[in-house]
Amino acid sequence: MGIIYFTEGATMNLEDFAKRLPKNFTEQEFVDLMNQVIDLKTIVDLPAAERSALFNGVQYLVDFIMLAREANGELHSHEGHPVVNYGGPFIPHVLVRPEGFEMDRTALETFGVGEAEKYFGDG
């Protein structure tokens, strides 16, 4: 079975991404490696059907990885609710953007690098 790349310019697959991401990575390192898997700039201009198909593929991976984490005893909970850690750049979309903030297209250009500070401060 061959490697399927999302774009012509891709130089690695997601498994390679997971192996190459440093333990203490910066947001920019994360984005730079993701851009080697898929050209993030092209996602905005994909036809809606292709963007939907890509979303379905990525959501399938999320669901499959969540099941693998659960099966391997890697899930954590807080007050009885499952907690999923995420360490990549913050993308302020409709499901996670704090109340009172309007949609901002900037993250489509920054790929989330530095976006968390706008919403949550320096932490």
Image: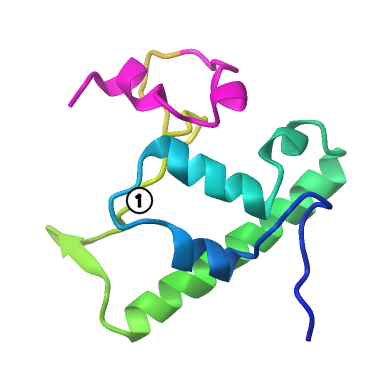
Q: Residue furthest left?
A: 79
The amino acid on which the numbered mark 1 sits, given as a three-letter code, is: Tyr
Looking at the image, residue 22 lies above or below residue 13? above
Is 115 on the left-hand or right-hand side of 1?
left
Where on the picture, by quarter, is residue 82?
bottom left
* Quarter of the figure with the C terminus: top left
Where on the picture, by quarter, is residue 66?
bottom left
* Quarter of the figure with the N terminus: bottom right
State the image coordinates of residue 55 (x, y, percent, origin top left): 68, 52
Asked whether 104 or 20 is in front, the reply is 20
SS at mark 1? loop
Q: Residue at x 75, y 74 (%)?
A: 3
User: Is-magenta flag for residue 119?
Assistant: yes
State the image coordinates of residue 21 (x, y, percent, origin top left): 43, 57
Q: Which residues are magenta?
A: 102-123
Q: Which residue is mark 1?
A: 86
Crowding at dot 1, Cα within 10 Å, few <14 / some 14-19 / many 20+, comes out as: few
Is 54 on the left-hand or right-hand side of 96?
right
Q: Residue at x 40, y 37 (%)?
A: 27
User: Is-magenta flag for residue 121?
Assistant: yes
Asked whether 29 or 44 is in front, the reply is 29
Looking at the image, residue 122 lies above or below residue 68? above
State the image coordinates of residue 113 (x, y, percent, origin top left): 45, 29
Is 123 on the left-hand or right-hand side of 108?
left
Q: How is the image coloured?
A: rainbow
State the image coordinates of residue 35 (x, y, percent, origin top left): 63, 45
Is 87 on the left-hand or right-hand side of 50?
left
